[in-house]
């Protein structure tokens, strides 16, 4: 959701703030705004380019705050754009999250004579800080007092005209990272805009309030008691967060597929012994051995990774697995006990519903684990143990390389659990060998990307699309459809091939093409029958398979062949052509794939 960024130091703040916003653009692009105490505020609807056009130079000043909005309260208008100010227009804040009690706070402030210019909850917090300022005459104390009155979630930064070098950041339920530079300090929603300045960061925890000046940082809790937070060093390279030679992050990240798998398995696969060595699980390995079931929780793409894992773990480990979207899990009464593992799958490590699911699991005594890409993220810290993806920063809103890495990490987990529970060493070796071969096979697929581009071009005028798969590739049908939906805004459905006759077949005609995921596996023949049924209704079929024979070529309007692998790993190869298809399809339609409308990269509100 929204991106926040702030700077205090010796340099001119404006270019640093704009650069920071550009890095964070994937978090929201409904509106953008900056405030520099010495120069004032500028806001615009839309993304950073619009903001740049509105700025009248010079805008001097060595500190400032900046924001990109993904609208929750109020439409994406200039009035609703951040920063928002108190009544004296000397205190300005940027905010990511939702102030849940904003209505009652607003009513109270209205009785005190405040006027509101926006329909945001953020303006209420800004006015509340100003209200306390009248009484306390102290910036820090006023921010603290206002935060103590606030219910809900925030990652926020405040700036005060009369103390221009001081910025105050606070966190409750939405991520805030502090970057520690030499004579300069930074605040951001995630590390990507900080990396180009420093690799030393502090992740604020819920309830933390940080006061930053160019040469100092102090952290308090909401009771104003000073606390220590560890400085961590970020391993990600700044180049990883840039587009490089690619037109879009999405394409860059798909093209990183082979490298991503290599990074996910590096040092973790002992092929000769057929085992996975997962250092992040060492401390809880014996606890894991005693657990009886696993609940996997994730949202969107991460949820689909969980669905694939259900097949892997049940087949090769023999442990019951349930998979659930975080937003459902947290609102029912899931049966969780001390024999349960709750496993979160998440790229950002900040998804609100997944995080709450983990907290619920903890409350009920489960062992909580995470498969997380973002080092230091909330879920990585709140789970008992976990596996980092090491996929590098994923900037494209449509998750691609993270999904490939999640599936790889889940395959490693399957091997780890299986070998704990009686999987033979020969089966272990077979899986390990096949995992090791994946990067090369991914390269072979990526080398043929123009074939997919051609197919995407041919179908780019379609208004509907069906994705169909079975067993291990059941979830890949959903994920293929999700990618097309979010990048192209067209109607795309993912279906289990066996379900076709139970309803979806009725939609099929010559204008409703199907992408059929049909590897030559234990359900190949069944899938072939489903393709015939579609063709009998004049439906066009693009076949995605690892089998190149006359029969399958005859029954496909278009075909894409991927290399062979074992059934459980086939989703890792099959998803890549579908990601490329969604990319090229959207490009054909002239859409900005890195910034799909209405979406943001990280969903930190419920
Ligand atoms: O950061 P997370 O993996 O927890 O995010 C979960 C979903 O929001 C995410 O996968 C979303 O569905 C993507 N935009 C899909 O491409």
Image (spheres, rainbow, N blue to C red):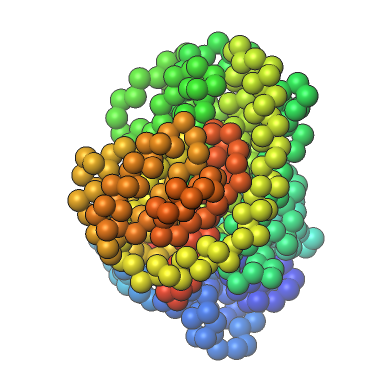
Task: Using the image, determine if residue 604 lies above or below residue 434.
Answer: below
Identify the residue at image location x=66%, y=34%: 434
**How many numbered badges does the structure rendering display?**
0
Q: Is residue 66 visible?
A: yes
Q: Which of 169 and 479 lies nearest the eye of the viewer?
A: 479
Identify the residue at image location x=66%, y=53%: 444
Task: Using the image, determine if residue 103 lies above or below residue 340.
Answer: below
Taking the image as shown, residue 31 lies to the left or right of residue 193, namely: left
Q: Which of 104 and 290 lies nearest the eye of the viewer?
A: 290
Taking the image as shown, residue 504 lies to the left or right of residue 236, namely: left
Identify the residue at image location x=50%, y=85%: 54
- Residue 387 image point, x, y percent: 63, 33
Task: Please tell me in which quadrant of the rendered image residue 451 appears.
Answer: bottom right
Taking the image as shown, residue 401 lies to the left or right of residue 539, namely: right
- Residue 281 image point, x, y percent: 65, 25
Q: Is residue 145 visible?
A: no
Q: Which quadrant holds the N terminus? A: bottom left
Q: Which of 160 and 65 lies nearest the eye of the viewer?
A: 65
Q: Which of 269 and 348 lies nearest the eye of the viewer?
A: 269
- Residue 487 image point, x, y percent: 43, 63
Task: Please tell me in which quadrant of the rendered image residue 103 appears.
Answer: bottom left
- Residue 530 image point, x, y percent: 33, 43
Task: Using the image, determine if residue 132 lies above or below residue 520.
Answer: below
Identify the residue at image location x=28%, y=39%: 499
Residue projecting furthest to the front? 550
């Amino acid at each position: 959701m929204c991106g926040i960024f702030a700077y205090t130091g010796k340099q001119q703040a404006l270019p640093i703030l704009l650069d920071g916003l550009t890095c964070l653009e994937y978090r929201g692009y409904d509106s953008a705004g900056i405030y520099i105490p010495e120069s004032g505020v500028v806001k615009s609807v839309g993304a950073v380019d619009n903001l740049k056009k509105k700025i009248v130079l010079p805008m001097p000043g060595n500190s400032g705050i900046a924001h990109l909005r993904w609208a929750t309260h109020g439409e994406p208008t200039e009035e609703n754009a951040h920063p928002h100010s108190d009544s004296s227009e000397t205190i300005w804040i940027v905010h990511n999250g939702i102030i849940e009690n904003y209505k009652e706070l607003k009513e109270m402030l209205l009785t005190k004579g405040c006027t509101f210019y926006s329909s945001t909850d953020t303006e209420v917090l800004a006015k509340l800080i100003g209200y306390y300022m009248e009484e306390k005459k102290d910036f820090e104390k006023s921010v603290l007092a206002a935060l103590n009155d606030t219910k809900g979630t925030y990652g926020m930064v405040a700036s005060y005209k009369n103390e221009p070098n001081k910025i105050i950041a606070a966190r409750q339920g939405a991520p805030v990272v502090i970057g520690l530079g030499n004579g300069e300090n930074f605040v951001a929603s995630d590390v990507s805009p900080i990396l180009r300045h420093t690799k030393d960061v502090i992740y604020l925890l819920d309830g933390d309030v940080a006061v930053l000046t160019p040469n100092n940082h102090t952290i308090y809790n909401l009771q104003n008691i000073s606390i220590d937070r560890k400085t961590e060093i970020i391993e990600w390279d700044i180049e990883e967060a840039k587009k490089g030679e690619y037109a879009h992050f999405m394409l860059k990240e798909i093209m990183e597929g082979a490298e991503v798998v290599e990074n996910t398995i590096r040092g973790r696969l002992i092929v000769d012994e057929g085992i996975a060595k997962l250092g992040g699980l060492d401390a809880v390995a014996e606890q894991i051995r005693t657990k009886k079931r696993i609940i996997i929780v994730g949202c969107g793409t991460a949820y689909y990774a969980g669905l694939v894992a259900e097949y892997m773990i049940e087949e090769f480990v023999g442990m019951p697995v349930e998979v659930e979207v975080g937003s459902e899990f947290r609102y029912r009464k899931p049966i969780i006990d001390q024999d349960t593992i709750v496993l979160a799958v998440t790229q950002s490590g900040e998804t609100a519903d997944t995080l709450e699911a983990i907290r619920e699991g903890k409350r009920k005594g489960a062992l909580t684990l995470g498969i997380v890409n973002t080092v230091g993220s909330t879920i990585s810290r709140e789970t008992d143990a976990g596996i980092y993806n090491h996929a590098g920063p994923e900037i494209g809103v449509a998750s691609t390389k993270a999904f490939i890495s999640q599936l790889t990490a889940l395959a490693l987990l399957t091997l780890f659990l299986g070998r704990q529970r009686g999987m033979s060493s020969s089966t272990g070796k077979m899986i390990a060998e096949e995992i090791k071969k994946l990067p090369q096979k991914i390269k072979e697929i990526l080398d043929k990307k123009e074939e997919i581009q051609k197919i995407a071009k041919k179908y780019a005028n379609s208004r509907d699309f069906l994705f169909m798969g079975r067993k291990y590739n059941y979830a890949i049908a959903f994920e293929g459809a999700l990618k097309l939906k979010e990048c192209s805004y067209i109607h795309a459905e993912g279906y289990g091939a066996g379900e076709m006759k139970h309803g979806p077949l009725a939609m099929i005609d010559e204008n409703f093409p199907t992408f059929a995921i049909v590897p030559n596996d234990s359900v190949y023949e069944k899938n072939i029958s489903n393709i015939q049924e579609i063709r009998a209704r004049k439906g066009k079929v693009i076949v995605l398979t690892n089998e190149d024979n006359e029969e399958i070529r005859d029954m496909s309007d278009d075909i894409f062949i991927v290399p062979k692998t074992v059934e459980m790993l086939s989703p890792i190869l099959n998803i890549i052509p579908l990601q490329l298809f969604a990319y090229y399809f959207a490009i054909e339609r002239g859409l900005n794939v890195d910034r799909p409308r209405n979406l943001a990269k990280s969903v930190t509100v419920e």
